Amino acid sequence: MRWWKAVGLAGAAGVVATGVVVVRAERRRRAYTPEQVREQLHVRYAQATSAAATPETITPPIELTGFRARARQLAQRVKGAWPPGRR
């Protein structure tokens, strides 16, 4: 068997496998009733709004020292010099 035939068969097998996965996901999605979907959406909305209502703590920036600080300075210097000729 030629190598290009093997590659073609492998590609066809990949397409078939992808189709099987898509069909299974579609069947699983269609198994829900509209009431179940609506209920899940309400639960997700309640979780999202409760998470947004809680204040997040702001952490102070980490002070870089040593190698990390030097690497950041170098990166900023290179970034400021790119593209060449722009100052």
Image: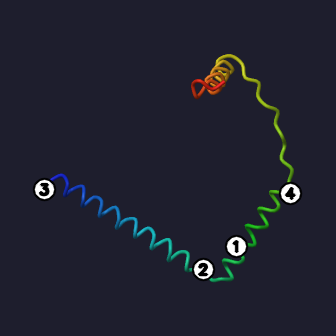
- What residue type is disc 3 on? Met
3D distance between C-alphas at marks 4 and 1: 20 Å
Q: Mark 3 or mark 1, which is nearer the start of the sequence?
A: 3
* Residue topped by disc 1: 40
Please identify the quarter of the rendering in which residue 2 is found: bottom left
3D distance between C-alphas at marks 4 and 2: 30 Å
* Residue topped by disc 3: 1
Q: Is residue 38 above or below residue 74?
A: below
Q: Mark 2 or mark 4, which is nearer the start of the sequence?
A: 2
Number of the front mark, 4 or 2: 4
- Please tell me which residue is depicted at 35% across the width and 65% down the height of the picture: 15
Image quarter hosting the N terminus: bottom left
Q: Mark 2 or mark 1, which is nearer the start of the sequence?
A: 2
* Residue topped by disc 2: 32
Q: Is residue 22 above or below residue 9?
A: below
- What residue type is disc 4 on? Ala
Q: Mark 3 or mark 4, which is nearer the start of the sequence?
A: 3
- Please tell me which residue is depicted at 58% across the width and 28% down the height of the picture: 83
Q: Mark 1 or mark 4, which is nearer the start of the sequence?
A: 1
Using the image, tell me which numbered label, if any, was put on residue 53. Answer: 4
